[in-house]
Image: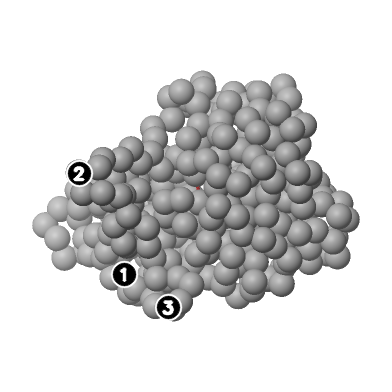
Amino acid sequence: MSEELRSLLWTGSSLRVLDQVRLPFEWAWIECTSCRDVYDVIKNMNVRGAPAIGVAAAYGMALAAREAINRPDPAQFVYDAAELLKRARPTAVNLTWAVNRSIREGAPDLGRDPEAVAAELTEFAGTMAHEDEERNLALSTFGATLFEDGDTVMTICNTGALATYRYGTAFGCIDAAFQKGTRISVIALETRPYLQGARLTALELVHAGIPFRLITDGMAGFAMERGMVSKVIVGADRIAANGDFANKIGTYQLAVLAQYHGIQFYTAAPMSSFDFSLSSGAQIPVEQRDESEVLCFAGQRVAAEGAHAWNPSFDVTPNELLTGIVTDRGIFRHPFGRWE
Ligand code: MRU
């Protein structure tokens, strides 16, 4: 596996975040020393990808507990920090999951000595980071079995090491297959408007040495019609109890196209991306981002002044369109609903 690209580094007293807004041309790290800093880097998408956001938020809780030491009501400060972090982005469940777990399991008694709470939450964030690494490695190993020599695998957005603490999810499966010698190639979608495919996945593919071609999102159907795609694998930001899932905008149309063309369509995600409190994908909150991302391309306005845009950052794919869900517990297939 290619391991060198890292999204987050804990220094012992701060969280270093690789600024993904500037990639692939500039490698800059943002130093987060407060919970507010972590909120900002998640909201501004300097760090993005569901599992990476979850781990960043766990470190945000650790930083909040450190800041709380000299506050009049340290416990309340940490609770407020938790609420702030959860508001940073709404769709990826890993964020809320990580924050809630930090309070429930990391420091169950926030009324205790604030120094002890800070130490506990720092250790817990490290545990969550390590867990994410292990889950992604496990799911990548399961997912690698899906691919055969000669496969061309289509993917959207970025689901590699940059989107996780380590290894990646959908990208991790592709990479694990390639690294064990399966002769596959990739078609990566550029992923308008934020260009995670063009800016980040292309970088990860180059880095891993996997042969690929980048296409614009609108080329996906024609590529399938021309027989250029044998499988599709994507990530997930939140999977409901029935298997419906939210992922980057454009995923749903890929699933519909894949079914029309008889192409297997998978999502890959750690169990931390499941939200069993939701019975279906209709209940998943979908982040709406600023219209300027659509009205502009790479920071340059392309639509006429006076034009307005719609900019949902995710869409929801119904479970019927899925061939399977790759997780750290194995590959689930229809009928979905039994997740043990
Ligand atoms: O808006 P982003 O870049 O955070 O969206 C990321 C995705 O949609 C990924 O596919 C998903 O988070 C899984 S990442 C392993």
Q: CA distance from mark 2 to mark 3?
A: 33 Å
Which residue is the extreme one toward the left? 72
Q: Is mark 3 within 8 Å of ligand 1?
A: no
Determine the secondary structure under disc 3: loop
Which residue is the extreme one toward the front? 304
Q: How does the figure colour the protein chain or chains?
A: one colour
- Residue 169: x, y in percent? 63, 52
Q: Say which label, 1 or 2, has the lower sequence index.
A: 1
Q: Are marks 1 and 2 in contact (CB under 8 Å)?
A: no
Query: Relative to the observer, which residue lies in front, 171 or 257?
Result: 257
Amino acid type of disc 3? Glu
Q: CA distance from mark 1 to mark 2?
A: 38 Å
Amino acid type of disc 1? Cys
Q: Say which label, 3 or 1, has the lower sequence index.
A: 3
Q: Is mark 1 within 8 Å of ligand 1?
A: no
- Residue 188: x, y in percent? 62, 55
Residue beneath disc 2: 306
Q: Which mark is residue 26?
A: 3
Crowding near the residue tagged with mark 1, few <14, some 14–19, many ≥20 C-alpha atoms within 10 Å: many
The reply to whether residue 86 is in sight is no
Closer mark to the observer between disc 1 and disc 2:
2
Query: Residue 175 sits in which quadrant?
Result: bottom right
Q: Is mark 2 within 8 Å of ligand 1?
A: no
- Residue 67: x, y in percent? 23, 64
Relative height, residue 320 to residue 27 (above, below): above
Q: Say which label, 2 or 3, has the lower sequence index.
A: 3
- Residue for point 63% across, 30% down: 256
Residue beneath disc 1: 32
Crowding near the residue tagged with mark 3, few <14, some 14–19, many ≥20 C-alpha atoms within 10 Å: few
Determine the secondary structure under disc 1: strand
Closer mark to the observer between disc 2 and disc 3:
2
